[in-house]
Image (spheres, rainbow, N blue to C red):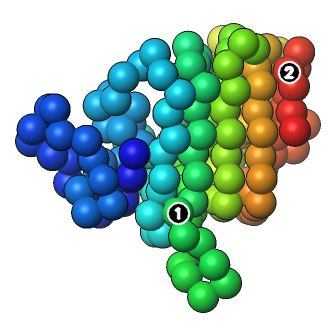
Amino acid sequence: YFVSPGGEASHDPDALNSLTNPFPNLKAAMAGTRPNELRTFMLLPGMYMGPSNIFGVDEELVLSYPLSIVAYNTTMESPETVFDCGPGGAPNRGFMHLKDSVNQMLMLEGVTIRNCNLRQPKPQHAHHAIQTSPFQVTNGRLTMLNVTIEDCEGVAFGAMWASKSLLT
């Protein structure tokens, strides 16, 4: 399945989205495809911003199927494929919290994660480390290939935090 930050989803629910008819954002792609299959989302180059593309640590992404998010046709000459939390880094949202997905794997390939900060934990979770890093994996499986994390910071434990998880 193809996703473009400037794409428009098909109005035909039975149409498979393609390179010429991509989903308009990552959440539309997840909602518009079968949940019980291996899914690969090919991201066309561009900036993926806002709540339709950035899951945030407050949403707790739980996978019931393997999911691959891959930059499409990225070469040295092509533009980057970037998840950008925006100027100032959306200070209380972060990038993603993959949770309770130990039997399913999330693979990220060829993307840049930029400006995703979590500068202060939510008051009800102030004592939990899990709420202090912008990219979190709890009891999950994550594979990252050629992924760049830049200008991301947390209150503690840096840009990424993992517990009871398999990271490759």
Tell me whether circle 1 and circle 2 mark residues in contact (CB < 8 Å). no
**The N terminus is located in which quarter?**
top left
Question: Badge 2, how many Cα within 10 Å: few under 14, some, many 20+?
Answer: some
Residue 4 in view (yes/no)? yes
Mark nearest the camera among 1 and 2 is 1
Q: Position of residue 23 (x, y in %)?
A: 30, 48
Query: Which residue is located at x 75 percent, y 14 percent?
Result: 102
Question: Badge 1, how many Cα within 10 Å: few under 14, some, many 20+?
Answer: many
Q: Position of residue 55 (x, y in %)?
A: 51, 35
Label 1 to label 2: alpha-carbon separation = 27 Å
Residue 96, placed above or below residue 148? above
Q: Position of residue 131 (x, y in %)?
A: 73, 25
Label 1 sits on residue? 72
Amino acid bearing label 2? Ser
Nearest the viewer among 59 and 88 is: 59
Left or right side of 66 for 4? left
Label 2 sits on residue? 165
